[in-house]
Image (cartoon, helix red, strand yellow):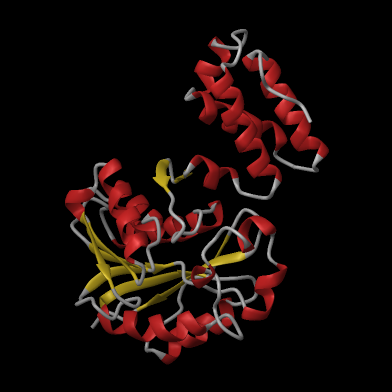
Amino acid sequence: MTSFASQTVETARRALAARFKSAANDSAELDARLLLGHALGLDLTGLISAAQRRLTPDESARLEEFANRRLAGEPVARIIGEKEFWGLPLRLSPATLVPRPDTETVVELALELLRAGGDLNRPLRIADLGTGTGAILLALLSELPATRGFGTDISESALQTAAANAARAGLSDRAAFLACDYASGLSGPFDLIVSNPPYIRSADIAALALEVRNHDPIAALDGGADGLDAYRALIPQAADLLAPGGALIVEAGAGQTSQIQALMVAAGLTATTTPRADLGGIPRAVAGHKMAR
């Protein structure tokens, strides 16, 4: 095993990337750069500037710890303690999922529908059910300057993380957080409700990637026997809270969109928009509308 003691910053980066590649890590170069930067407290520019200086013993030990954690399957975002989503750096906690690019499809579809309905600068009221890090809510608030929103979660720890992320993004004055089961503690009306609920079938949890299975909270993954338990709970709640003309947008697992649309229709919503696909081509964001009076 390579020791990073007395290596230069650049040599350590290359050695770390080589270790990751030998372990069949598909993102070896990126992971090495991110973990080295975290160990040294340097961004990319800082790493380039410091390329020829030698690591201190403390830096070497810290990088070795990070390397071993990554090789054991811990995601880089967990090691670093944050993940970027919609351009916002978000802190993580054991009670929150790592925000993923797939979830940005929910934000994209929401903004598309709101833009079609009028000026994005108009005051709106939105809610994010099962907010976790606050990712979807804060992304939307960053794009909607006159909008206020609520984030709900059953985990107090997750809500503390989300509130800290709101403060970090300068959005605390427009974001409030509430401990409850999806929308059960909210009062309407809302112009938009969004959610990325648990949607993995219970029997499929064991087959998930190690990074997910061992490091994301199971409560935020497990959607019950068919993966739809959370939708059965939140869709009727959301439908009751939407203003006429308002929309509910949820993230879906592969192959679930038609079933989710049926649940929306059963709750009195209309599925008038084609689900938006993620970068892998999987239909990911599903919308239902409450008919205007």
Q: Where is residue 245 in the image (x, y as percent from the top left)?
A: 29, 74
Residue at the image point whose x is 69% and y is 31% from the top: 29
Q: In this rendering, is residue 142 above or below 103? A: above
* Observer-nearest of 149 and 185: 185
Q: In this rendering, is residue 239 above or below 37? A: below
* Observer-nearest of 256 and 70: 70
Residue at the image point whose x is 44% and y is 87% from the top: 265
Q: In this rendering, is residue 79 above or below 51? A: below
* Observer-nearest of 24 and 236: 24
In the image, is 262 to the left or to the right of 208? left
Q: Where is residue 195 in the image (x, y as percent from the top left)?
A: 41, 68
Residue at the image point whose x is 29% and y is 75% from the top: 180
In the image, is 164 to the left or to the right of 215? left
Q: Where is residue 146 in the image (x, y as percent from the top left)?
A: 19, 52
In the image, is 117 to the left or to the right of 278? left
Give the position of the N terminus as an image quadrant: top right
